[in-house]
Image (tube, grey):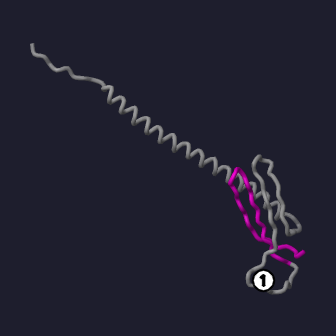
Amino acid sequence: MARFPRQHSGFTLLEVLVAFVILAGVLGVVMRISAQAMDTSLRAAERQQALMLARSQLDRVLARRELLPGSERGDFDLAGFHWELDVTPFTFPEQENEPLETIILPYRIDLRVYWGQNYELQLTTLRLGVAP
């Protein structure tokens, strides 16, 4: 009787181990990318929240009848968000040495929103107001 060589079916232990090592490496990279994407999404959501709060506070300031130079600070209802407002008379560089001829002045409004440890958003605009 002639013996026929048996055909092997399945994988060897070494092939299975190599497949697990490759799979573990790929899953590690995918998990790291996923964590970075979630962190980026969270920071973008916080920045969007800060922008919405800053626009809302700036609208309150622009709705005032009189705009007076000075600084203000406050907290938003949302935990961790704070704001600072600075209103200063604005002079154009070519008008710095000229005498004031009108009672209408442009004011520079700087509104900064802070949150977290090192995050800040600033909105700046100009508005006309009556000179003090």
Q: Is residue 89 toward the left or the right of residue 15 in the image? A: right
> Which residue occupies 73% across, 66% down?
124
Q: Under tag 1, what secondary structure?
A: loop
Q: How many marks?
A: 1
Q: Quadrant of the C terminus?
A: bottom right
**Residue 65 image point, x, y percent:** 88, 67
Q: Residue 17's image quarter?
A: top left
**Residue 61 image point, x, y percent:** 83, 62
Q: Is residue 108 magenta?
A: yes
Read off the residue under disc 1: 96
Q: Quadrant of the N terminus?
A: top left
Give the residue furthest to the top.
1
Magenta: main secondary structure equals: strand
> Which residue occupies 53% across, 43% down?
34
Mark 1 packing: few (<14 Cα in 10 Å), some, or many (20+)? few
Give the residue furthest to the left.
1
**Residue 57 image point, x, y percent:** 79, 58
Give the residue furthest to the bottom.
98
> Which residue occupies 80% across, 51% down?
76
Which region of the structure is painted magenta? Answer: 104-132
Amino acid tagged 1: Glu
Q: Is residue 68 magenta?
A: no
Q: Residue 13's image quarter?
A: top left
Q: Is residue 24 toward the left or the right of residue 71 in the image? A: left
